[in-house]
Image: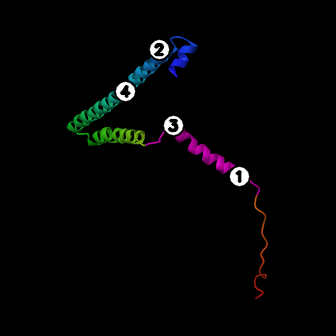
């Protein structure tokens, strides 16, 4: 196939391989950037939790256990939920937004249907047995 390309335009195969190498280099850099981004995020979370624990320690030392519980409890729960949901497979913003749209569409489609025709009873009238 490369011979056919060279017959059409000399040097085309070399251009294609150079483009391929450039694409691969770009993909590797993006992969390393993703690793760096994840590492920075984890480090930030660790520093945040550490800061909350230090603040809670000083609050306990000052005799404020309620402040310490709130300083550690609420943010820790939020971080746990954020990290837990971000690791669920298939969880994307698009999926989260399309689910309610499908529900609203189904409800409105059901509301637009005409009411069912009243049915007449086929048995004897009540009290005639």
| Labels 2, 1: front one | 2
x, y percent for residue 41: 35, 30
- The residue labelled by disc 4 is 37
Mark 2 crowd level (few <14, some 14–19, many ≥20, 10 Å Cα): few
Q: Earlier in the sequence, mark 4 or mark 1?
A: 4
| Labels 4, 1: front one | 4
Q: Are marks 1 and 3 in contact (CB under 8 Å)?
A: no
Magenta stretch: give its range: 89-114
Q: Quadrant of residue 128?
A: bottom right
Tell me: residue 121, above or below residue 12.
below
- The residue labelled by disc 2 is 14
Q: Secondary structure at mark 3?
A: helix
Q: Earlier in the sequence, mark 4 or mark 2?
A: 2
Q: Secondary structure at mark 1?
A: helix
Q: Is residue 98 left or right of 14 when viewed as pictured?
A: right
Tell me: residue 60, above or below residue 33.
below
- The residue labelled by disc 1 is 111
Spot the residue most to the top.
Answer: 10
Q: Quadrant of residue 48?
A: top left
């Amino acid at each position: 196939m490369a011979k056919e390309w060279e017959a059409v335009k000399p040097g085309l195969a070399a251009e294609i391989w150079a483009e391929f190498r450039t694409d691969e280099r770009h993909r590797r850099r993006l992969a390393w950037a993703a690793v760096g981004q994840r590492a920075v995020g984890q480090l930030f979370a660790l520093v945040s939790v550490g800061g909350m624990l230090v603040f809670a320690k000083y609050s306990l030392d000052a005799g404020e256990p309620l402040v310490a519980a709130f300083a550690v409890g609420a943010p820790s729960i939020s971080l746990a939920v954020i990290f837990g949901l971000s690791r669920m497979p298939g969880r994307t913003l698009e999926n989260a937004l399309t689910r309610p749209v499908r529900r609203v569409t189904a409800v409105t489609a059901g509301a637009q249907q005409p009411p069912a025709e009243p049915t007449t009873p086929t048995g004897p009238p009540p009290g005639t047995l």
